[in-house]
Amino acid sequence: MQKKQFNKNLNVPNTLTVIRFFLIIPFVYYFMNNSYLAAFIILGISGVTDMLDGMIARKFNQFTELGQMLDPLFDKMTQAAVAVCFAIKEPNLIPLLAIFIVKESLMVAGAINLISRNKKRPGGSKWYGKVATVLFYFSFGTLVALKWIWNYESLLLNVVLLSITAVFMIYAFVRYAKIYVEILHSDDPQYNIDIREVMDKKKKMRS
């Protein structure tokens, strides 16, 4: 009898990544229903999971192709959801928030294009992407806490925090765009991904 193969995708970092995805819905629900403390707590938990999944993956060498694809995708979905919620509540911040939405949309489209059309693996998260994410959580978390929990509002503070975050996110986008172009035109087999082979492996692990 053949010994059942362990599915390496079932690990702590990937679990934390999936949890971050499911936290999007309650965040949007609480935020749009003016339950800002609950929304702030959920956003904080989401940020912690984003920090821990990478730390655990590096410490225990639990990197997987699935995790490297889902982690940046769910980061982008979380950031887009938060940006849209803020745009609805604070229309005067729409120009700055649009930067976040456009950046994340373009990066998701690029990743989908690499995987579906070019059968190539998108590059994983880099330090500048993680820093941009930390700034994102810090800026929006601070704005939520100050205005809707402690009833303090400053347009100048809003613009400063979001501008700093936007500048670094643009920087991260430019760096990621260079990697995208490099992968797109590269013949290096390390970037190749066979989706059918990956699915076949998953089926064998389940059987």
Image (spheres, helix red, strand yellow):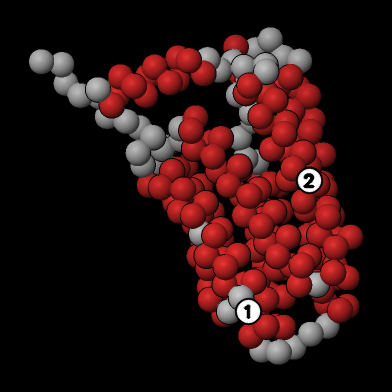
Q: Residue at point 45% right, 53% down?
A: 19
| 140 or 204, nearer to the observer | 204
- Residue 200 falls in which quadrant of the image? top left
The circle on residue 43 is none
Is residue 160 shown to the viewer in this render? no
Is residue 21 shown to the viewer in this render? yes
User: What amino acid does circle 2 point to?
Assistant: Lys
Q: As drawn, which residue projects farthest toward the bottom?
A: 151
Q: CA distance from mark 1 to mark 2?
A: 27 Å
Q: Residue at point 60% right, 11% down?
A: 189
User: What amino acid does circle 1 point to?
Assistant: Asn
Does residue 47 lie above or below 154 as drawn? above
**Where in the figure is residue 140, as x and y percent of width and height?**
70, 68
Q: Residue at point 55% right, 17% down?
A: 193
Circle 2: is it few (<14), some (14-19), or many (20+) Cα within 10 Å?
some
> What residue is disc 1 on?
34
- Residue 14 falls in which quadrant of the image? top left
**Where in the figure is residue 170, as x and y percent of width and height?**
83, 48
Please count the marks in the image.
2
Disc with the residue nearer the chain's start (1 vs 2): 1
Circle 1: is it few (<14), some (14-19), or many (20+) Cα within 10 Å?
few
Does residue 162 lie above or below 120 as drawn? below
- Please say if the residues under marks 1 and 2 sit with CB atoms less than 8 Å apart: no
Quarter containing the C terminus: top left
**Where in the figure is residue 71, as x and y percent of width and height?**
55, 43
Q: Secondary structure at mark 2?
A: helix
Q: Secondary structure at mark 1?
A: loop
**61 left or right of 189?**
left
Q: Residue at point 35% right, 39% down?
A: 10
> What residue is disc 2 on?
103
| 83 or 66, nearer to the observer | 83
**96 left or right of 53?**
right
